[in-house]
Amino acid sequence: MKSDKRNQQTEQLLIASFIDLIKEKNFNDIGVTDITRLAGVNRGTFYIHFSDKFDLLHKIERELLEKLQEALNSVIPTAIEQLKNDSFEILPYKLVIKTLNQIYNDRDIVAALLSSNGDPLFVNKLKDLFRKEIRVEFSQIKDSVFYDEVIPQDYIEEMILNNLMSIVIHWLTKEHPEQPEEVAKIILRYREVSPDELIRIKKEE
């Protein structure tokens, strides 16, 4: 039992050291030696837990996506019930909002992965997770969902998810990010107004 706990602590130490390094330099420039030196363990210990730095990266991302998936699964029944009162197009926004607390809890890791030093593919993995859930939910009410006649469905999904991910990335990469509740208000407000309403220029008399 003590050995298992020690292994878990060592693994978390290696992960934390890896994240600290990504804040300072590009993933491609990070070596196993850099990680073990910062963690204060030898290379042999690293290879007990991970096959290489890519394995470490994939484990971090896999665990994050699993946490987000669990968060989504916990709110799906409520989301479906709310669709009886909400307009259907608000669902993508509410699904993302429901995961903000989980994202905030792991903000250091998520921000590092989404940064220019991290994994350029991670944002697409996040989008794919939300895209999958949105499609699952819409499939249950497909007879009531109507898409724009001009813009194809896949473009609509991409525009919505790009906008949402841009907000999340900006939020997490701020030095002092707002609480999830505040970001939820920003996202909903953004959805409710048109771009030309966000900025007004006072006309001279």
Image (spheres, grey):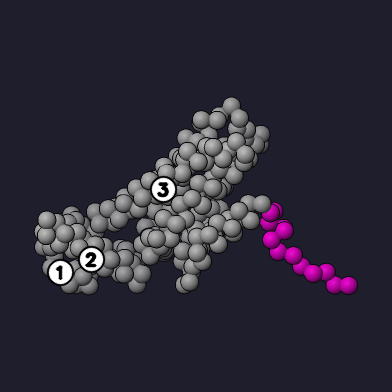
Residue 77 highlighted magenta (yes or no) = no
Asked whether the viewer can see residue 95, the reply is yes
Looking at the image, which residue is at 71% across and 64% down? 199
Q: CA distance from mark 1 to mark 2?
A: 9 Å
- From this view, report whether residue 37 is shown above or below residue 48: below
Q: CA distance from mark 3 to mark 2?
A: 25 Å
Looking at the image, which residue is at 14% across and 56% down? 4
Classify mark 2: residues with Cα within 10 Å, few (<14), some (14-19) or many (20+): some
Disc 2 residue type (three-letter): Leu
The label on residue 188 is none
Residue at mark 3: 71
Classify mark 3: residues with Cα within 10 Å, few (<14), some (14-19) or many (20+): some
Q: Nearer the viewer, residue 146 or 187?
A: 187
Q: Nearer the viewer, residue 155 or 201?
A: 201
Disc 3 residue type (three-letter): Ala
Looking at the image, which residue sits at the far top? 143
Residue at mark 1: 41
Asked whether the viewer can see residue 135, the reply is no
Residue at mark 2: 13
What span is colored magenta in the figure? Answer: 193-205
Looking at the image, which residue is at 72% across and 58% down? 196
